[in-house]
Amino acid sequence: MAAVVVPLFLAALAALSGPVLAHGGLNNYTVGETWYRGYDPNTPAADQVGQSWMVQRPWASIDPIFSVDDKHIACNDPGSPPTSYIPIQAGENITAVYWYWLHPVGPMTAWLASCGDGDCSAVDVNEVEWFKIWEAGLLEGPNLAEGLWYQKAFQNWDGSPDLWPVTIPASLKPGKYIIRHEILSIHIENKPQFYPECAHLEISGAGSAFPPKEYMKKFPGAYKADDPSIRINVYGSEDTMNYTIPGGPVWDG
């Protein structure tokens, strides 16, 4: 494994070469005190793809995906596989690190997909079945447009990274998995913006549980274009507080 224990403020120095405006993206991961490098779309791919430290599927740019039927909604574009895994025990937190994120409105979800008995690098991310392990949306009012969403609450404005912790279900059976983090921004009327990134995990533990079929989704396929939670005008919604996060229920073990 290419894990390196690095203080986060040192990791921040590497991020300064990236853009400081626009959307942002998932650049690093931490498990406990161990920091894992992710992909940087502003650095030549040849310097990153195939490197022994790479745990994240590369993503081409910070631009969003607009269509629920786009094949890149699974793990972004190009989504080519990494060569390494993040080791983590079921029940532990994995924290996604964003060095900047500016959008304030919309839900955030985290998903897992089992790679079966094989290597995750051979998995087609459009064919595997994903199950949701975490979600957060509107935290408090007064309404969808002006309320506090988790997407805004996890942001920092002091130069420190935006940290998104997710717990791997403690009862999950061990194996190789892909983790998928997605931010869905709905701040523009009827023009949803999807921001997915994926990494490879080697999950250990004594669990034996696995979600039943009703939790399983494919990307594309998990979302419908006419879903009122996706194709929405938060500024003109008559229902000022209720919001259903798309993608079905969370499986927490």
Image (spheres, helix red, strand yellow):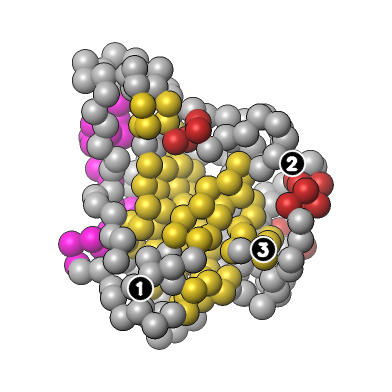
Kindly identify which numbered label has been placed on residue 18: 2
Estimate the spatial distance between the alpha carbons at disc 2 and disc 1, rounded to whole Å: 36 Å
Looking at the image, residue 129 lies above or below residue 185:
below
Q: Does 248 sit left or right of 28 as displayed?
A: left
Q: Position of residue 2 (x, y in %)?
A: 70, 73
Would you say residue 156 sits in the magenta stretch?
A: no
For the record, the magenta segment spans 213-232
Near mark 1 (Cα within 10 A), the count class, few <14, some 14-19 or many ≥20, is: many
Q: Residue at x 56, y 74 (%)?
A: 87
Please name the amino acid that badge 3 sits on: Glu
Residue, disc 1: 172
* Farthest-out residue, left: 214
Please name the amino acid that badge 1 sits on: Leu
Task: Tell me the SS state at disc 2.
Answer: loop
Looking at the image, residue 174 lies above or below residue 161:
below
Estimate the spatial distance between the alpha carbons at disc 1 and disc 3, rounded to whole Å: 22 Å
Dominant SS type (magenta): loop
Would you say residue 227 sits in the magenta stretch?
A: yes
Near mark 2 (Cα within 10 A), the count class, few <14, some 14-19 or many ≥20, is: some
Q: Position of residue 47 (x, y in %)?
A: 77, 62
Estimate the spatial distance between the alpha carbons at disc 3 and disc 2, rounded to whole Å: 24 Å
Q: Residue at x 31, y 61 (%)?
A: 252
- Quadrant location of the C terminus in the rendered image: bottom left
Please name the amino acid that badge 2 sits on: Gly
- Please name whichever residue, 207 or 53, is drawn nearer the observer in this view of the structure: 207
| Residue 158: quarter of image | top right
Q: Earlier in the sequence, mark 3 or mark 2?
A: 2
Residue, disc 3: 33
